[in-house]
Image (cartoon, rainbow, N blue to C red):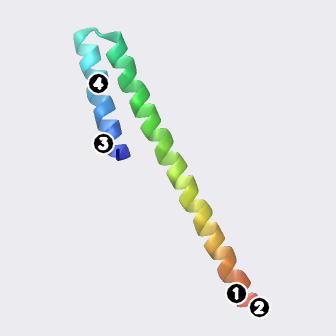
């Protein structure tokens, strides 16, 4: 599932848990939000690493 959707679904769970007094549902929402944020960061790091590799490859090609 897309991380924006995951964050949104987590927010809904968290708010529903707060309103209903269901601490377990609230916690599940918080965990879902944190997981989505983590996945965003991992994805960004992978993209940065690919970009670095591409730039290094271009520099090597130019120096040959």
Q: Is residue 4 left or right of residue 37?
A: left
Q: Cα distance, mark 1 to mark 2? A: 5 Å
Q: Residue at x 35, y 11 (%)?
A: 23
Q: Residue 5: which disc?
A: 3
Mark 1 or mark 3, which has the lower sequence index?
3
Mark 4 or mark 3, which has the lower sequence index?
3
| Disc 4 + disc 3, Cβ < 8 Å | no
| Disc 1 + disc 2, Cβ < 8 Å | yes
Q: Is residue 56 left or right of residue 6?
A: right
Mark 1 or mark 4, which has the lower sequence index?
4
Check disc 4 and report its element: helix, strand or loop.
helix
What crowding class fits label 4: few (fewer than 14 Cα within 10 Å), some (14-19), or many (20 or more)? many
Mark 3 or mark 2, which has the lower sequence index?
3
Check disc 1 and report its element: helix, strand or loop.
helix
Q: Residue at x 64, y 75 (%)?
A: 55
Which image quarter: residue 3? top left
Mark 4 or mark 2, which has the lower sequence index?
4
Q: Cα distance, mark 4 to mark 3? A: 12 Å
Q: Cα distance, mark 3 to mark 2? A: 46 Å
Residue 56: image location, x then y, percent: 69, 75
Residue holding disc 4: 13
What crowding class fits label 1: few (fewer than 14 Cα within 10 Å), some (14-19), or many (20 or more)? few
Q: Residue 64: which disc?
A: 2
Q: Cα distance, mark 4 to mark 2? A: 56 Å
The extreme front residue here reads 1
Residue holding disc 1: 61
Q: Is residue 55 above or below residue 46?
A: below
Which image quarter: residue 36? top left
Q: Residue at x 34, y 38 (%)?
A: 6
């Amino acid at each position: 599932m897309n991380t924006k959707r995951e964050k949104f679904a987590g927010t809904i769970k968290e708010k529903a848990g707060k309103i209903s007094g269901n601490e377990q549902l609230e916690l599940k929402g918080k965990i879902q939000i944190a997981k989505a944020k983590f996945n965003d960061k991992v994805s960004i790091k992978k993209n940065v690493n690919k970009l670095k590799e591409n730039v290094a490859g271009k520099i090597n090609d130019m120096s040959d």
